[in-house]
Amino acid sequence: EKSSFTMHLCTSKSQSRSRHNRSITYVLMLFYCCARTALGWLTSSNTRQSSPLILQRLHSSKSSVKKMSILDSCPDTVATSSSYDEMNKSKGMSKDYDPQSFESSVYKWWEQSKAFTPSNNKKKAPYVIPMPPPNVTGRLHMGHAIFVAIQDVLARFHRMRGRPVLWLPGTDHAGIATQLQVEKLVQEQEGFSAKKHLSREDFLQRIWTYKEEQGGYITNQLRVLGASADWSRERFTMDPDMSNAVIEAFVRLHDKGLIYKGEYMVNWAPGLQTAVSDLEVEYTEEEGFLYYFKYLLLQDESDASHQEQLYIPVATTRPETIFGDTAVCVNPNDERYQKFIGRQVLVPMTGRTIPVIADEYVDIEFGSGALKITPAHDPNDYTLGKKYNLTFINIMNKDGSLNTQVPEKYQGLDRFDARTQLWEDMVSADLTLSKKPHMQRIPRSQRGGEIIEPLVSKQWFVKTQEMGAKALHVVQSGEMKIVPSRFEKIWYNWLIDIHDWCISRQLIWGHRIPVWYVGNNSDEYIVARNQQEARDIAVNQRGHSQDVMLTQDEDVLDTWFSSGLWPFATVGWPSQSEHDPESDLSRFYPATCLETGYDILFFWVARMAMLGLELTGKSPFSVVYLHGLVRAADGSKMSKTKGNVIDPLDTVDKYGADSLRYSLVTGVTPGQDIPLNMEKIEATRNFANKLWNCCKFVTENALKGADAAELASLGVAGTMTQEEYDTLALPERYIVSKCHELVQSVTEDIENYSLGAGGSKVYEFLWDQFADWYIEISKTRLYEGAGGGGNEEAKAARRVLVYILDTSLRLLHPYMPYVTEQLWHHLPRAKQENGFAVHALMLADWPQLDDDQPLVQNAVDVKLFETFQALTRSIRNARAEYNVEQGKRISATVIISAGKLKDELKAELKSLVALCRLLPDESSVCDAESDEAKAAAMVESVRLVVQDGIEVILPLSGLLDPVKERKRLQKQVEKLDKEIEKLAGRLSAKGFVDKAPAELVAKAREELALLESQASKVRSSLNSIMV
């Protein structure tokens, strides 16, 4: 019953197209999976990892239900007794390109075959790419799709070039995002705040449960895109070995004096009640107000002559922070306020006095030119506060309400309620001047959306100046290369002006800071790897008793701290030795390339560089490749509000993963944003369909005449030799030369990280050269009706067709892995060993394994054939110009000087006949002085000059029917004459010329001149036709 039900699912693909039938099918599938579970067919250890891809997608989200292929539901679609390619080839090629019918099956075979694991090739250096870890509970978006597309190109390319490739995947625990989701879930389902009502242990257990239920979908969705990552090495930032690495890093950095606890300005999220990193703050332009108010001067003897109390006008966007002001600052060059510098002013509604100070930082032109200084609640004011040794007053509680540092009336009010109340009170006290609308940049939490509050808080920090200098040096020295290089300037600017890094977060979910406080003394603490080590230090080194109370710090580490260790912690640091040549740490660290978005160059890449250099003494990677952001077709940011978001899984479902991947990688240069539209993706799908049809022609038509021995000999086992090349005819030599030129160019492009250029060149070659030219010419070798039929000629054509297609599929494979793998299985191949892996295109050799490998090319042959192409285009253009019916054949005489070119063109006359639809018996190639050429010139004809020394004579009688053509031209003349008469009459009317705008009159005269020119040409053609 299992077998028959599986067969039913596999053969019901067409029914799955309708939403109604699909819904029924999914219910059946879920029922079937429950039955499988009950019968013990599913193992319990890793169900999500081993389940069919359709079920993985089904678990992922409600929106992904429509993104599945029924073929994915067949658990044993890929037979384990023989390789997938043998089964694929035996089934034959389907009529049309249908990516949904094979993509998931191909991927399942790759992964089961362990094709993604690094080879043991010791002759070549490994190529290592650490995958930027997506959030463990996240869902696929275009940001993930672009990094998969680019990184997979690099991984597949270098794997095919013989290098052991480790593309190391994993997920990030995403402290804030994951905890926030659980908090929302508890609030919605159970009606209380998890943070307030659950113990730390219970809250953590809830989060771990959520992670187990929701985690894993993102990695399965990355698989849908074809990511050839080594999933056997998949890491999670809170795995035990990763957690040990985080603790070890903290301890070592603290021992070096690079980690300390202190007070500093941080981004505080009152809703989350934690500090957040700069990366987790997004600035938006929002309408607000600029509040102008009076800072009353404390009166002295010099003010006696003034009837009204003097004041300094000050503007602010956050009136509630007035309670934290400790100075008013003016520009020393501002003549309005120079006399007030050094005096005291009264803080509104408090009675407290603060000084007036001067600093050129103040912009004289902005606002009133006087700046209130709130050192504890503004980053810039913090700097001024330190500079002038001002008092720091924190007026905020952790939840964003005002604390006891403000007057009692305002204590406990939310910051925004306090703003409203304070302003009303200041209006009543005659301390306000005006309130004006003002556009301002508002910092909001990326996760919660709340407005961030800058405040001074006691946190754990990493000293970054020395570490930043090391990261600066490796780029300046060339040890680490940034692609594109223009981002080096940004790297330098950030690392030169770097600030200490706040690494503590007031969260539950994350790596708990390995610090224990001794007794009730928050000032005495011990940094240790675990509590027992902390106790040993307390007793043996600090002299405390054995039963001393130790309390671990409640905070956790910034997610970016743990992900900053990613390149080396994922390959065994610190447990493995770099001196053991067989260890992962020795083989795969440092990594080769770190590929990521330019938007996290500072926040993640720089921190990986700093931590890697400090903890391992090595730069963690040689190359940093930065891609741009995926944007809408018009260049705007994708957003749900605008309705211009393109969902990757929807796109894959409609067009296939290859079309999306190729569209993302090509057409742009590194670091540029990527405008994406469905037209581009659809065009790529059309290209895949063209490739599919090319392969069908080769396998189902061209190879039909080959016997078993010939088919066995056609497998591509290496590049074509000079000896074989020299035996070929011109079109074959040309296409091989161009193909070898392509191999060299694409290889150089990918090695130099010009991935878009390389992919575009393969596309252009396959479409413009192979499909449009050589396949058509090959028919003149293969089919008797097209002038072919010779056995040796047909064999040579089959050899070249297979060679070019095989080579092209290898070149295209990194960009479009699914369709190239599926098609490659249908081509003849050289003998391989048994097993899955050796039958995979993804593990086949790149056409140029080494840079010094010779590739036969001949510039003379290319030029000769380009002349043939120019000749062909000239005749085709003439046919189009004279509106010759597509099926009609015409005569042609090609006149050319004697020499190699004439011999080659004469040999390819049948190709010219086929491409230009010529009459075989009435077309020829001859010398300019020959009787044949002279006779052709005597006939009324059209002469085409192709280039110096090459002309084509086309008898006019073959191009058109004189009677029909005269009638057509006569009608055209009559139509043009009417238009000329009408426009000329309009221009002769004085009212039009005098009253119409000058530009309109000029435009009418230009149109008249154009019509008269067209009429003259048509009359000339009409007069030249004799009936």
Image (tube, rainbow, N blue to C red):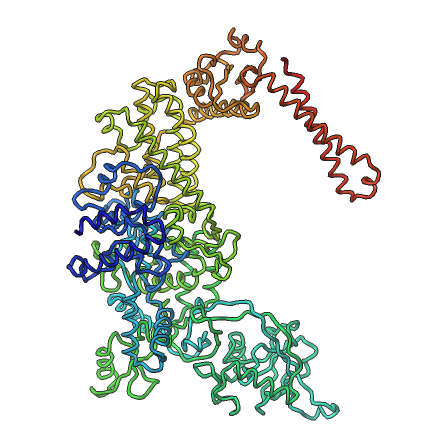
Q: How many marks?
A: 0
Closer to the camera in the image, 25 or 387: 25
Residue 356 position in % (x across, y down): 61, 83
Q: Is residue 86 above or below residue 782?
A: below
For the C terminus, the image quarter is top right
- At 32% from the left edge and 44% from the top edge, which residue is drawn? 818
Residue 497 shown left or right of residue 986 in the figure: left
Residue at the outermost top position: 931
Residue 609 shown left or right of residue 541 in the figure: right
Closer to the camera in the image, 23 or 360: 23
Specify the quadrant of the image occupied by residue 830.
top left
Residue 424 position in % (x across, y down): 60, 86
Q: Is residue 448 above or below residue 863?
A: below
- Is residue 504 in sight in this rendering? no
- Is residue 877 in sight in this rendering? yes
Residue 1005 position in % (x across, y down): 75, 35
Q: Is residue 187 above or below residue 489?
A: below
Residue 690 position in % (x across, y down): 39, 36
Closer to the camera in the image, 422 or 949: 422
